[in-house]
Image (spheres, helix red, strand yellow):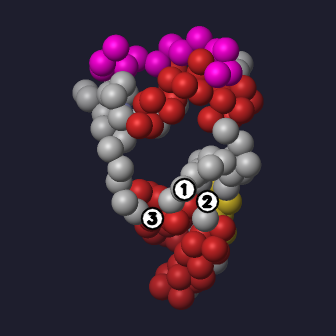
Amino acid sequence: VYLPGRNLLLLAKSTVWCALHDVEAIALGTLKGNPFADSGAEFLSLFGSLVQLGLDRPLEVRTPFAGFTKAQVLELGRDLSLEHTFSCIAPVAAHHCGRCNKCAERRNGFAEAGIEDRTVYSAA
Ligand SMILES: [Zn+2]
């Protein structure tokens, strides 16, 4: 499953919320190797300019994990309740589907990091 403009859609709605609540920075969890144009530095910088133009508010889009793989990010959170994080793009009854590419990345990341995956997946 590939959702064109996924980051654009995620940013659009949250950006309006930020503008209404005087929040001037937003963090996007894009990872190293993300191939999509709407996760690149140029796009995100221009997005901030667009927000300034359209909402008359400054907005900086930060990507603190852009240099990290999924496994490296999981390693950073090793001691956290990672089963409460969410990354699926096709949830089933509020659970990870277990079949989409994001669930595959998630499973692979846990395996690569050597961390037990306590995520509830709809499909095995
Ligand atoms: Zn999924």
The reply to whether residue 106 is visible in this rendering is: yes
Amino acid tagged 3: Leu
Residue drawn at x 67%, y 15% is 114
Q: Which residues are magenta?
A: 112-124
Of tags 2 and 1, the one toward the viewer is 1
Residue drawn at x 40%, y 63% is 5
Badge 1 is on which residue?
Answer: 35
Q: Quadrant of ligand 1?
A: top left
x and y percent of residue 14 in the render? 47, 60
In 3D space, how far apart are the residues under numbered discs 1 and 3 (Cα atoms)?
14 Å
- For residue 3: magenta? no
Which quadrant of the structure image shows residue 63? Answer: bottom right
Badge 2 is on which residue?
Answer: 26
Choose the circle earlier in sequence order: 3 or 2. Answer: 3
Report the magenta stretch's main SS. Answer: loop
Question: 52 or 124, which is in the foreground?
Answer: 124
Question: 76 or 37, which is in the foreground?
Answer: 37
Choose the circle earlier in sequence order: 1 or 3. Answer: 3
x and y percent of residue 107 in the render? 50, 23
**Number of the label disc, if any, that sits on residue 123:** none
- For residue 119: magenta? yes
For the residues bearing labels 3 and 2, Cβ distance under 8 angstroms = no
Amino acid tagged 1: Pro
Question: 37 or 44, which is in the foreground?
Answer: 37
Badge 3 is on which residue?
Answer: 8
